[in-house]
Image: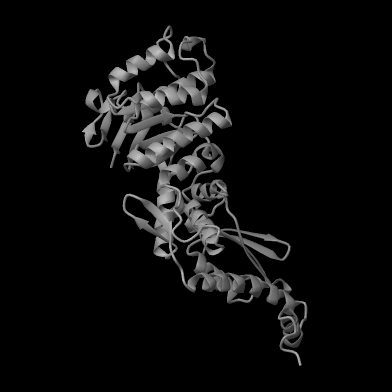
Amino acid sequence: MMIEAANIRKKFQAETVIEDVSLSVRKGSVYGLLGSNGAGKTTLLRMLAGILKANRGSVHIDGQPVFENNAVKERVIFLQDDLYFFSQYTPKQMAAFYKETYASWDEERYTSLKQMLGLDENKKINKLSKGMKRQVAFWLALSSKPDVMILDEPFDGLDAVVRKTIKSMMLQDVAEREMTVIISSHNLKEVEDICDYIGILHKGTILLERDIDDLKEEFHKVQVAFRKGKEPVTDSLSLVHKEKRGSVYIYILRGNKEEIEDHFLSQEPVVFDQLTLTLEEIFIYEMRRVGYAEEDII
Amino acid sequence: MLELDMRSGRPIYEQLVYQFKRLIIEGVMEVDEKLPSVRDLAGELTVNPNTIQKAYRELEAQGYIYSVKGRGSFVQQRADESSTMKVKELKEKTIPMLREAFYLGMTEAELEEIIREARGGSNDD
């Protein structure tokens, strides 16, 4: 495991922000940390990045404890939600600073990203817009070629083209050097394409943690209808949701796709269709199953 | 060349497997043609590289591609299996249509008539 948090807890005065979180991120994985505002994402990420010390539990990156450990921090880039730059500096000056901190700094990439993003390296960063500051942060981060990227709501305020450029370069690093990424968002749509693993943080605990493909393979949506409006037998199936529209029954089920198909087809339906289920729908049903109303979460 | 539906509940790797299979079966991708590298495809589609790796492993397991260490993945020579695949696909498409035909009250004799017609009347006297 590249990133490993075990039973961490964080309290600020009387308020417990992180209750009890354990999570692990495989090397070369892109982990999406989802949660509504106030779920504790930023606090959790700051502990993973070694900036904040947990009251209890431990955080390791590549087997090393992270808190105030410079050897680890030189391999990690943490992009915070509220970007902080030395206000009077230009990207070029920041680059010089990063070059000293990160042994893996890639000058060639710095130059090529400058062209791709079309940014001026001599303009003071505090004169830039929020979106451009974010681009500068990615520019420096991607040029540093870290082993681990910890990103807090990183795509806020970036347009679609820039998003794609950045995601694309990140994924190439994941493919090429097995860079490990943990990325937080309050919006599933924003990160579902690039993640292979998703965790949902809610009120300081991880509610759900799953491989995206496993999740998609587990849920199915079908519509079935029988002659004379007969109701299909579903006893042996794991039913998540059932709906009747006219004489057509719509089911959301968990289980093996072929078995579900065989089950219905053996009853000789007049209509039988597999419908597509979005990842968002799957999450909503899965959240309901563990006892949460979806509106506070996704 | 590849069209993915990110929002679909169908796993991305499955969509990739399906689409590569079609490209291979239909001869758009030729035998021994190199598939894009995992890195390039991940970048181009902005899809997680592990997902692409998974798709390539599946394609290899199903005999559609082979990989050469350090060089990448290539389209495998396939003898009859590709047509078997197509036959299976056709069957899947035909059955619902036939069911509908029966439902509408068509008889087997009428359907046989259609089959003869499709064959171009070569079996007629």
Q: Is residue A85 visible?
A: no
The image shows residue A193, relative to residue A105, as above or below, that is: below
Q: As drawn, is B41 to the left or to the right of A270?
A: left
Q: What percent of the width, then of the height, locates residue A214?
A: 44, 54
Residue visible at 51% across and 64% down in the picture: A257
Q: Which of A14 and B4 is in front in this view?
A: B4
Q: What percent of the width, then of the height, locates residue A16?
A: 37, 28
Q: In which image quadrant can residue A248 be found? A: bottom right
Q: What percent of the width, then of the height, locates residue A203?
A: 43, 35
Q: As drawn, is B52 to the left or to the right of A229?
A: left
Q: As drawn, is B112 to the left or to the right of B8?
A: right
Residue visible at 61% across and 71% down in the picture: B90
Residue visible at 49% across and 38% down in the picture: A191
The image shows residue A167, relative to residue A96, as above or below, that is: below
Q: What percent of the width, then of the height, locates residue A196?
A: 43, 45
Q: Is residue A146 visible?
A: yes
User: Which residue appears farthest toward the top when viewing the image?
Assistant: A88
Image colouring: one colour
The image shows residue A18, relative to residue A68, as above or below, that is: below
Q: Which of B118 and A69 is in front in this view?
A: B118
| Number of dots carrying numbers | 0
